[in-house]
């Protein structure tokens, strides 16, 4: 069975958040280093190293795209993949309003993506692997709900239903 791939376009909001946060996370260490005492404490050194570490870690979890292969959904990351078996998929539907009113429970809400565990009234608790909330596709399984945001939501939902 061939692999079917989709891009993960970034929304304007994600682009702005990522740009501003990246500038802050890169600029803060330079500012702190310029004000550092002659013999900085361990805590001060950690404060200088932590922002770039956060940026690098967040970039490692960025969503590059999605693929459907052998009854699995693959979340494509920089250099690795998250595999989600499609066994038990009960629904796959495009819904541009799916993530509205969401609260982040654990994860990243805007630096290279909306990735992690979220909750809202419409979906309840769900996992998101998203880059453009307007392109949301909701995947419902008996034990969990997942939201992805491929470049062609309707087509992705159709293909995911066929491969479940």
Image (cartoon, rainbow, N blue to C red):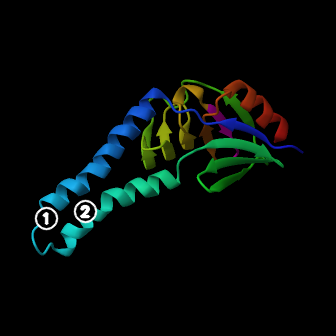
Q: Residues within 10 Å of mark 2 (few under 14, many from 20)?
A: many
Range of magenta residues: 137-142
Q: Is residue 143 visible?
A: no
Q: Magenta segment, principal secondary structure?
A: strand
Q: Which residue is mark 1?
A: 36
Q: Is residue 163 magenta?
A: no
The reply, left or right, for residue 114 in relation to residue 78 is left
Q: Quadrant of residue 139?
A: top right
Q: Is residue 39 visible?
A: yes
Q: Residues within 10 Å of mark 1 (few under 14, many from 20)?
A: some
Q: Earlier in the sequence, mark 1 or mark 2?
A: 1
Q: Residue at x 47, y 43 (%)?
A: 112
Determine the secondary structure under disc 1: loop
Give me the C-alpha separation between circle 1 and circle 2: 9 Å
From the top left corner, tell me how far across and down residue 22 is, in percent. Answer: 36, 45
Determine the secondary structure under disc 2: helix
Q: Which residue is mark 2?
A: 48
- The quarter of the rendered structure image containing the C terminus is top right
From the top left corner, tell me how far across and down residue 136 is, in percent. Answer: 59, 30
The reply to whether dot 1 and dot 2 touch (C-beta < 8 Å) is: yes
Q: Quadrant of residue 65?
A: top right
Q: Residue at x 31, y 44 (%)?
A: 23
123, 66: nearer the viewer: 66
The mark tally for this picture is: 2
The reply, left or right, for residue 107 in relation to residue 46 is right
């Amino acid at each position: 069975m061939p692999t079917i791939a989709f891009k993960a376009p970034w929304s304007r909001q994600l682009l702005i958040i990522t740009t501003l946060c990246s500038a802050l996370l890169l600029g803060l260490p330079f500012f702190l280093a310029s004000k550092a005492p002659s013999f900085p404490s361990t805590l001060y050194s950690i404060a200088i190293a932590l922002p770039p570490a956060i940026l690098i870690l967040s970039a490692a979890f960025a969503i590059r795209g999605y693929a459907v292969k052998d009854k699995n959904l693959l979340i494509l990351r920089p250099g690795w993949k998250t595999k989600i078996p499609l066994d038990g998929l009960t629904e796959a539907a495009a819904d541009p309003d799916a993530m509205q009113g969401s609260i982040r429970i654990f994860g990243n809400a805007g630096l290279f993506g909306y990735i992690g565990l979220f909750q809202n009234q419409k979906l309840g608790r769900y996992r998101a692997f998203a880059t453009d909330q307007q392109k949301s596709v909701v995947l419902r399984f008996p034990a969990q709900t997942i939201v992805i945001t491929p470049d062609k939501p309707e087509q992705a939902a159709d293909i995911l239903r066929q491969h479940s």
